[in-house]
């Protein structure tokens, strides 16, 4: 399997999950508890760094 294709696929999946979460927050109460903007940014940074670490180890 091509690494570049795999990483693009994973990135699209991750962005899709983030966008779905924003959509669910706009539509109404989400399954997750209400979070402030800095908690969301911190969580996004942590998840992104973990994903990058995994890709560096796999490659």
Image: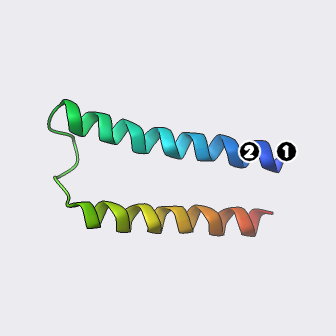
Locate residue 56, reporting x and y percent.
73, 68
Say which residue appears at 62% left-offset and 45% top-offset.
10
For disc 1, the marked residue is 2
The one of 21 and 26 positioned closer to us in this rendering: 26
Dot 2, crowdedness within 10 Å: few (<14), some or many (≥20)? few
Q: How many marks?
A: 2
Q: Residue furthest top?
A: 27
| 54 on left or right of 3 | left
Locate residue 31, reporting x and y percent.
21, 42
- The tag on residue 16 is none
Labels 1 and 2 touching (C-beta < 8 A): yes
For numbered disc 1, what is the local secondary structure? loop
Q: Quadrant of the C terminus?
A: bottom right
Residue 57 found in image quarter = bottom right
For disc 2, the marked residue is 6
Residue 30 found in image quarter = top left
| 44 on left or right of 9 | left
Locate residue 49, reporting x and y percent.
55, 68
- Is residue 56 depicted above or below 33 in this figure? below
- Is residue 12 depicted above or below 50 in this figure? above
Structural distance between the alpha carbons of marks 1 and 2: 6 Å
| 34 on left or right of 15 | left
For numbered disc 2, what is the local secondary structure? helix
- Is residue 6 depicted above or below 49 in this figure? above
| 37 on left or right of 50 | left
Dot 1, crowdedness within 10 Å: few (<14), some or many (≥20)? few
Color scheme of the displayed model: rainbow
The one of 58 and 48 positioned closer to us in this rendering: 48
Q: Quadrant of the N terminus?
A: top right
Say which residue appears at 33% left-offset and 41% top-offset.
21
Say which residue appears at 77% left-offset and 42% top-offset.
5
């Amino acid at each position: 399997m091509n690494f570049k294709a795999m990483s693009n696929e994973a990135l699209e999946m991750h962005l899709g999950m983030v966008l779905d979460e924003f959509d669910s927050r706009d539509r109404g109460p989400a399954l997750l508890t209400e979070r402030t903007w800095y908690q969301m940014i911190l969580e996004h940074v942590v998840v992104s760094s973990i994903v990058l670490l995994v890709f560096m180890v796999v490659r």
